[in-house]
Image: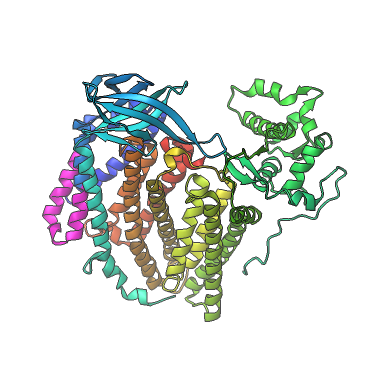
Amino acid sequence: MKTVPFILLLIAAAVIGIATFVEDAHGTLYAQTVIYGSLWFKLLWTVIIVATAALIVRRKAWRSIPVLLLHLSFGVIFAGALTTAFTGRKGMLHLRQGSTTEEYADEQKRIFTLPFVMRLDSFYVEYYAGTEAPADYVSQITCLQSDGVRLARPRISMNRIFSRQGYRFYQSSYDEDMKGSWLTVNYDPWGTAITYAGFILFGLSCLLMLCARIGEFRRLLRHPLLKKGGLFLLAGFWAMQAQADPPLPVVKRVQADSLAAKQVIYNERVAPLNTLAKDFVQKLYGRPTYRGLSPEQVVSSWMLYPEEWSHVPIIRIKSRELRTTLRLQGDYAALTDLFDGTQYKLQSLWQHEQNRQSKLGKAIQETDEKVGLILMLTQGTLIRPVPAGTPRLSTPKVKAELLYNRIPFSKILAMTNLTLGIVAFGLLLYRMLKNRRAGIAENRLWTALLYLATAFHAFGYALRGYVSGSLPLSNGYETMQFVVLPVLLTACLLHRRFPYTRPFGFLLSGFILLVAHLGEMNPQITPLMPVLSSPWLSYHVSFIMISYALFAFVWLNAILALCLMGRRKSVLSPLPRERVEQLTLLSRILLYPATFLLGVGIVMGAVWANVSWGSYWFWDPKEVWALAAFIIYGLSFHRSLLPWLRHPRAYHIYMIVAFAVVLMTYFGVNYLLGGMHSYANA
């Protein structure tokens, strides 16, 4: 009987996980109707809440106030969700400039009437200064009584809502002629308030769980095992190759370098020319420099001598099939290799491949984009001067961006930390199996290297934030850069008591940076999308990323513990039980902040969604898998009710399986399922 709630929770986690694939195959409306909005789905969660409440009463859980409040918060959140499902309404309101209406339609096309009248006075798009990148979408509205008396004149835009008599209006879309606006209407007078009360109760209970003197977390921190503790940095980075002496005209380095700080419009923002030039060469050649020539030399030389540079093999073609089709001798093609007289070779190839979704078709598209960049450069449309009246970057910001462009922070740290991590992890395993300890001098060396790596990454991330003018969390590349910070900081904080965290910190940070560097995530600095210009986004992503970093430490802990336990039969010396106990203890300690941060991050995301889109939960694939991860990790706290979790081997295997759900949440959803969170890899 005591395991029923946990079995039901695992079933619920499996159901919502499967539902994301059903949605991907049959569409969102089908999944909402057949699964998320169905009666049986609501009954499943109702039974879970009832069974949990019965278990709490049976186990007399009210004797621990934090535990009681934590589980009570789940019940309040569920009650709020049910209230929203049965009493709330959501629809769309379409307004044309100058016209009035008091009717809106829901998803089933049913018409409802507002207790007041709405009129659109104007709709317009605000742009980032000097660019065509939208900064906000704005509807200027007049709210009237039925007799024409004006009640309010709100400005509705992204992350700026209008509330009246229990109705909330959100900017959703607009007509192509810019004379019409679509507003999301959300009428939920009770459900949202109840759910928010549950959110607040959840946050409070998490703090109490971490701070309560008689709580499990504080007891783990007082464990006796906590009192027992237990390759060189690359000297430089060879980014510049020996400059060849190419038989083509090249602008002198001094003249080209003087162009680096010139300000242009690039990626819909004001940026130094160096940023544009670096991205141009990187896109074409695969590296930020070409044969020792600086990016400014390449761009300015090509503009001045287009005929000569069109014969230079600088366009990298990764596809062997495309290189064979074009009869190329190496990995690079010149612009002239892609033309047969005036005939563009890729055009005929694309006509043959465009409907096949083949790898060759993708390679043709990528190469065509590079050709397009070259043509834009030679035709004078790639480099756009800053319009008069547009605010320019300050001198310190220009210098900061030039510094950020010249130091490949991610590449240096990925190579360095992976190398150090492999060496440190190998030494750690060797010493544990031989039951030896590292010397004081060696410990100090590894600690110094860890602190240097942390400071180096923190400086690079802060520099990117200063250049972009916001916390860098707007795409997949930046979120992976951010998650490296808690990984390294966690290793810095714990390495004295838990030596294992030092190699873990190096390995995890190096791997994450390598994935960001090689995973085709966009490293360019761009303006924020309007919906992302919200402080709730920063809180949401920050909390989630920190939790993922801590879960990664738990995962590596589990791998190391299983390695040590697996050696029991193959070595004559007894298993160092104390080492395994330390790893288990560290895992259990980290699970508290990791799981609570994940839960709080989900809550922050719900608030952000409510502010931006009018609803705090959409059953989006990213939301669903984050909830599944929270459920899976949440079960691991119930060792007294699930005896198998008390066995180290079973516990660590469970932690490895649980981390697979985290990987699915971050990577699998982005690459397999998509959804509203697909911007994360933009």
| 281, 171: nearer the viewer | 171
The answer to whether residue 674 is magenta is: no
Compared with residue 338, is residue 47 higher up or lower down, i.e. above or below? below
In the image, residue 660 sits, relative to residue 367, either above or below, namely below
Q: Closer to the camera, 658 or 149?
A: 149
Q: In this orientation, does residue 188 appear?
A: yes
- Left/right of residue 199 with respect to residue 312 in the rendered view: left
Residue at the (35%, 35%) spot, across then down: 613
Which residue is drawn at the image coordinates 51% and 69% (left, top)?
A: 428
Where residue 63 appears, x then y in whole percent?
A: 13, 61
The single residue placed furthest to the right in the displayed view is 247
Colour logic:
rainbow
Give how far across and how far down residue 570 sits, in percent: 47, 66
Rendered residue at 70%/49% (across/down):
260
Where is residue 465? Give x, y as percent: 52, 53
539 and 347: which one is in front? Answer: 539
Quarter where residue 68 is shown? bottom left
Residue 399, picture quadrant: bottom right
User: What count of labels does the image hold?
Assistant: 0
Q: Is residue 65 left or right of residue 156?
A: left
Residue 50 position by quadrant: top left
Residue 56 falls inside the magenta stretch: yes
Examine the rendering and report whether any part of residue 632 can be seen. no
Above or below for 204 versus 576 = above
Residue 268 in the image, given as x and y percentages of width and height:
57, 38
Q: Is residue 279 left or right of residue 522?
A: right
Image: magenta residue range: 46-74
Question: Overall secondary structure of the magenta stretch?
Answer: helix
